[in-house]
Structures are given as C-alpha cells and as structure tokens.
Amino acid sequence: MDDTTFAVLGTGGIGRRTLDVARHKDGLTPVAACDRNGVAIDHQGLDVDELLDATEGNIASGPDEASGDTPATPTSDYASDGGAAAAEGATAGGGVKQAGEGAGIVASEQGEPTDAPIDDVIAESDAIDAVLLALPNLEHDFIPRIAERFADASYEGVLVDVLKRSRVIGMLDDREEALVESGITFVCGAGATPGFLTGAAALAAQSFVEVEEVKIWWGVGLKSGYEDNRGTVREDIAHLDGYDVETAREMSEGEIEALVDEHDGVLEFRDMEHADDVLLERAGICDAEDVTVGGVLDVRSDEKPTTTTVRVTGRTFDGERGTNAFELDDATSMEANVNGPALGYLKAAVLRNRAGDYGVYGPAEIMPSF
C-alpha cells in the first residue's frame, strides 16, 4: 500500500508507544501529535526520536481550579494527554505529571502551544490519512464526540481508537450516518481487549455452528511503569466492584495510590464492561451476554501476573462440543499487544477507506494488516 500519514491524539502512555512502535512498521509516517498543552505537525514526518525524548517524564498537566478550568468534559480537549489523573492534594481536575516549564509536546522543538489541540489537528486533516485516538475515555461519550467533530469538519479518512466500554459502541453507531456522509472509516476498540483478543475469538469461533460462550482473561504487568500509564490504570479502576467511570475519574492520585497499596499492587477484575461483548455480537459470533472479560493488573511488576487467554466454547456442525483456546506468550508486553494491533487495524482501515468503505467497524469485522 502507499505510505500512510497519521496523527496521534494524546501523548500519554498509549500515544507515546504508538509513535515508538510505528518506527518499526513499514509504510507509516506520523505527521501530527497533540496533548492538552500543545501540538506538533510536520507533513514531511515528525522527528519521533526528538519528540519522545522531549516528552519523556514530561506529560502535559491538566487544568486546575485556580485557573478557572474545569475537569475533563466531552466537549473539552482537557482529556487529550493520555491521562486525567489528579495530582495528590489537588482537585479532581488537577495536574497529571509535569516536569519543568512547558510540559508535554510544547517541550519539544517541534511543538507549539495551543488552547485547542484537537481542532488544530482537524484543521490539518486534509493531509492526514488516519488518526489514532489515544485518549482516556473517562467520559462515556468523549470519543464519540471527538469523532463527531471530525465529521463536522468533513474529514475524509480513518479514525481508530482503543476504547474499552460496551456502551460507547452504541454512541458511535448513533453517529454512523454522519461519519459515512463525511467519508470516515472508524474502527472502534482496536487495542488488545477489545481488539486483538476480540479478533482472536472471532477466528476461534469458526470451528462451530453455535458459540455458547467466550471467556477472555488477561494479565498485564506494567513494564513501562505506572507513571506512564496513569490514564489506563484509572480507566481500569472504574471496573472494580464499587467503582464506576465517574468515581474513578474524580479520585485523587493519593486515593488511587492508597487503593493500589490496599491490594499490594495487584488489581483483579471480573465481569468487566468491556466492549468485546457487543463487538462480537455485532459480528454475529454470539450474544453479548455470552461474553465475559476479566483479568489481573500488576502495577508494580514487569511480569504478567497471569497468562492472557481467549477460550471459545461451542458446538460443531456434527454435534460435538469443544473449546478452542488462544494464548498470548507472557513475553509479549502490553505495549506490543495494544499498539501493534492498533496500528495494524489503522493500516487495514486505510485500505477500506480508499476503496470508499465508510462507517463504524469492530475488530471482529476487519483483519488487521501487518
């Protein structure tokens, strides 16, 4: 395929790793990146090495009460740095992680400060084939509203996200007509789970004429460190018993650290509201209620606390009942299993978009390109 230019919205853990992994993929040229403080755009290709070096340990902070800003909302750009955590002792809308003056992309020689980073990327989107939304989904309709903004600007291209929650898929479907009219191909839930493992379940189901259940069980050790994954951890906390998106979003850093200490750094999740269920249902694999997702997150260890597996149980055409299992090697990191597939789905979506195939797709409906 021809070279694909792409942008990354959000340069927290997922966004930074996307830029890093893209250097090892053929045919991908990152031309834009933004966080809540700034934007870097170069249609000839960003200097990824310089950008990553400049932003290492220097992620853009969020708004604070003193400045009159408000916590992240679906219509704001405040959630665009890859994390919406609050600094210990600050308000819920306070800083995430900051070092020196001009945190985040503005610390790079390629970066420019801006009050509207996403709008600045949209303004340049005629020259951008695809956009990866590496944004924390700490408002249910935040990502759907971002998609709507691209459609309102008549963007013709690809949007890919790594969202997690089932209910967001319906919000994207509600906007599908506008996306099609604009010429947008949107691949939702294109990370590890949902994403990579959703696609694996769809393949494993092909042995059967009826799928009885799909069980996804994941294990993650934060090899890249908790400091670089605060937004991801906060999103996962929303799935713990007694928590939801709103309560997790409002927790201070001190409260999150206390919760992590209480569990000795290991958080276990069962019956998560993960979009694998509705994504497999929309692909015709099984009913959403037949899908369960859970896993274990160790925020203090490089080692995976459990092996990531997908188990699909069903009945074959000749009446046999069996289970097909797919297993990820423990040596593959979260970074490899999230960002590799995300870029693979991005490349595949560009091919579809160039063929005039627009709308909303899930990872069980498209085979990612290597």
Image (tube, helix red, strand yellow):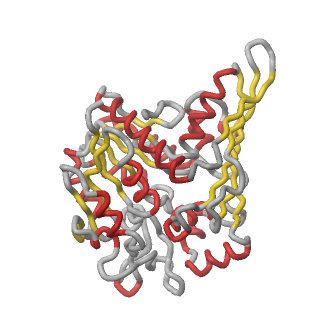
Is the C terminus in the top left, top right, bottom left or bottom right quadrant? top left
Give the residue displayed 37% in from the left and 72% down from the top.
60
Compare residues 204 and 364 and report the one nearer the observer.
Answer: 204
Residue 323 can be seen in this image: yes
The quarter holding residue 101 reads bottom left
Kindly identify the residue that appears in the image at 26 percent across and 39 percent down. Answer: 156
Left or right of residue 340, residue 204 in this image: right
**Residue 217 against residue 287 in the figure, above or below:** below
The answer to whether residue 53 is above or below residue 8 is: below
Total numbered labels = 0
In the depicted view, which residue is nearer to us: 344 or 38?
A: 344
- Give the quarter of the figure containing the N terminus: top left
Tell me if residue 151 comes above or below residue 229 in the rendering.
above
Residue 56, located in which quarter of the rendered image?
bottom left
Give the x, y percent position of residue 24.
39, 45
For residue 145, say whether it is visible.
no
Q: Which residue lies furthest to the right in this view?
A: 320
- Taking the image as shown, residue 242 lies to the left or right of residue 153, namely right
Q: Could you say where residue 75 lies in the image, as x and y percent from the top left?
A: 37, 62
Q: Is residue 242 found left or right of 235 in the rendered image?
A: right
Query: Which residue occupies the extreme top position in the image?
Result: 318
Residue 194 % position (x, y) = 56, 44
Look at 76% across and 29% down and name the residue there. 323
Q: Against 242, is 207 above or below?
A: above
Task: State the image coordinates of residue 239 (x, y, percent, origin top left).
Answer: 65, 59
Front residue (pair 223, 266) = 223
